[in-house]
Image (cartoon, rainbow, N blue to C red):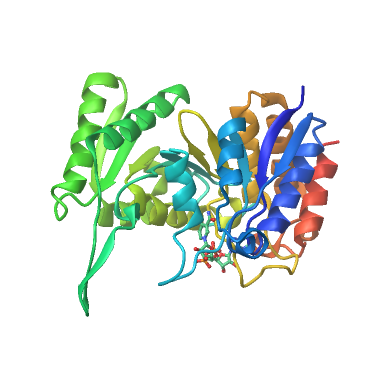
C-alpha cells in the first residue's frame, strides 16, 4: 500500500523546492501517493481561501504533510496560514535541527543544536486591539497545559535522541507572569520527569550572544513561540543560512514538515532557491514514517554532494553556481 503524503507547494520559491523534494523522495523508489493541496497566497486566487478546509481535512486524515513556504502579508491582510495550520491541527511542537554541514564553510564547524519551539501560544495568539487611535495592545498568551506539554516534548525528544541538555531561553525578568509560567513548567518537568538530563536557563538576550560566540555549548533549546521563531533563523545563520535548516511541526495526531525559511519572493521563479532545507525536512518526514533506510540514503547523498561536489553542484547561497534543479540532480545522481 503506498503511503499518502500531503504536499503543499506554497508560494514564492515553494513550488520549486517542493518539486525538488518530491523528485528526491521519488528517487528512493518508495511507494508514495502525493496528494497536492492548496494553501497560501496562490490558493486565494485558485480556491478563494488561503487555507481551504479540504487542505486541513486531508492532513488530518492522512497524518502527514510536506509543506513549502507560504507568503503572509505584513501589517495587514489575512492571518498567517502557518499559524492557522498549527493551531487547527494542534501542531504544538516545532522541531528544527541545526547542524554544521559538511563542506559548507562557516565560522563554526561544531554546531549541533535542536530548536524546540512552542507553536500555538505566546504573541502568536494574534489577539491585538486598538484601544484608541494610536494605542494598540498585543496579548501574549501562556497556559500551563501548553507550557508543560512543550517542556515534556523537549525533554522526551532529548532523551530519545541521546541528547544531554535542555536550555530554556526566556525573558522572565521582564515578562514575569507569561515567561515565568513557561520557566516554572520547564523546571517542574525537569525535576519530576527528567532529572537524568541537564537543564539550564538563560535570559534570551544573553542566550543570543552566547549562541553567536560559542554555539557548541548548546544542545536542545526550548523556547516559547516568538523566541523560537527568531532564534531558529539566528541558528540557521551559524551553519550557512536558511537553505540548510529543516523543520517539523508535530502534534499528537499529525505532523507537517517544512523548512525554516519563507517564500523568498526576491529569488522566486529564477531557479536560484536552495532546495536542501525542504529535502532535509523530507528526510525528517521519512524517519517519522519509519522509512529510515530511504531517509539515510538521501542524507548520505546530499552530504556527499556537499563534501565532494564542486561549486557547479551547489546553489549560490552556499557558495556555488548551480540552480535549484542542478543541485537536485546532483543529489539524485549520488543516490545511485
Ligand atoms: P525568507 O526566509 O523568505 O527569506 C529571507 C532571505 O533568505 C531572503 O534573502 C531569501 O532570498 C533567502 N532565502 C530563504 N530561503 C532560501 C532558500 N531556500 N535558498 C536560498 N535563499 C533563501 O524570509 P522573508 O523574506 O522575511 O519572508 C518572505 C515571506 O515568507 C513572508 O511573506 C513571510 O511571512 C513568509 N514566511 C513563511 C514561512 C513559512 O511558510 N514557513 C516562514 C518564514 C517566512
Q: Where is residue 163, by image quadrant? A: top left
Image quadrant occupied by the C terminus: top right
User: In the image, is 181 to the left or to the right of 302?
Assistant: left
Q: Where does the image place residue 248, in percent across and percent down from the top left? A: 52, 41
User: Where 318 sits versus 188, above or below?
Assistant: below
Q: Residue at x 60, y 34 (%)?
A: 64
Q: Residue at x 64, y 60 (%)?
A: 318
Q: Where does the image place residue 335, in percent across and percent down from the top left? A: 81, 37
Residue 284 visible to an observer of this rendering: no
Residue 199 visible to an observer of this rendering: yes
Q: Nearer the viewer, residue 225 or 87?
A: 87
Q: Nearer the viewer, residue 92 or 167?
A: 92
Q: Nearer the viewer, residue 265 or 102?
A: 265
User: Ligand 1, what quadrant?
Assistant: bottom right
User: In the image, is 19 to the left or to the right of 220?
Assistant: right
Q: Where does the image place residue 260, in percent across and percent down from the top left? A: 53, 52
User: In the image, is 94 to the left or to the right of 270?
Assistant: left
Q: How many marks?
A: 0
Q: Residue at x 77, y 21 (%)?
A: 1
Q: Where does the image place residue 115, in percent across and percent down from the top left? A: 42, 43
User: Where 75 sits versus 216, above or below?
Assistant: below
Amino acid at each position: 500500500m503506498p503511503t499518502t503524503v500531503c504536499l503543499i507547494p506554497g508560494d514564492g520559491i515553494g513550488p520549486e523546492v517542493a518539486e525538488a523534494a518530491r523528485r528526491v523522495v521519488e528517487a528512493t523508489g518508495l511507494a508514495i501517493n502525493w496528494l497536492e493541496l492548496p494553501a497560501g497566497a496562490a490558493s486565494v486566487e485558485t480556491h478563494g481561501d488561503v487555507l481551504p478546509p479540504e487542505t486541513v481535512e486531508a492532513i488530518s486524515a492522512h497524518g502527514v504533510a510536506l509543506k513549502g513556504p507560504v507568503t503572509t502579508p505584513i501589517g495587514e491582510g489575512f492571518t498567517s496560514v502557518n499559524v492557522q495550520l498549527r493551531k487547527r491541527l494542534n501542531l504544538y511542537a516545532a522541531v528544527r535541527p541545526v547542524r554544521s554541514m559538511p563542506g559548507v564553510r562557516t565560522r563554526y564547524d561544531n554546531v549541533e543544536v535542536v530548536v524546540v519551539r512552542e507553536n500555538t501560544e505566546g504573541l502568536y495568539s494574534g489577539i491585538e486591539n486598538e484601544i484608541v487611535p494610536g494605542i494598540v495592545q498585543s496579548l501574549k498568551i501562556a497556559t500551563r497545559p501548553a507550557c508543560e506539554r512543550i517542556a515534556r516534548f523537549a525533554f522526551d525528544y532529548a532523551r530519545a535522541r541521546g541528547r544531554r541538555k535542555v536550555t530554556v531561553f526566556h525573558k522572565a525578568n521582564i515578562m514575569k507572569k507569561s515567561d515565568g509560567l513557561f520557566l516554572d513548567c520547564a523546571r517542574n518537568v525537569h525535576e519530576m520527569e527528567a532529572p537524568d538530563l541537564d537543564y539550564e536557563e538563560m535570559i534570551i538576550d544573553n542566550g543570543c550572544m552566547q549562541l553567536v560566540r560559542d554555539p557548541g555549548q548548546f544542545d536542545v533549546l526550548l523556547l516559547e513561540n516568538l523566541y523560537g521563531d527568531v532564534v531558529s533563523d539566528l541558528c540557521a545563520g551559524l551553519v550557512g543560512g536558511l537553505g540548510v535548516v529543516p523543520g517539523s511541526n508535530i502534534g499528537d495526531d499529525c505532523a507537517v514538515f517544512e523548512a525554516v525559511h519563507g517564500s523568498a519572493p526576491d529569488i522566486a521563479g529564477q531557479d536560484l532557491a536552495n532546495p536542501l532545507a525542504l529535502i532535509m525536512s523530507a528526510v525528517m518526514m521519512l524517519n517519522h514514517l519509519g522509512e529510515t533506510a530511504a531517509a539515510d540514503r538521501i542524507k548520505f547523498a546530499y552530504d556527499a554532494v556537499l563534501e565532494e561536489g564542486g561549486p557547479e553542484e551547489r546553489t549560490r547561497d552556499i557558495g556555488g553556481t548551480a540552480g535549484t534543479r542542478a543541485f537536485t540532480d546532483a543529489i539524485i545522481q549520488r543516490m545511485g
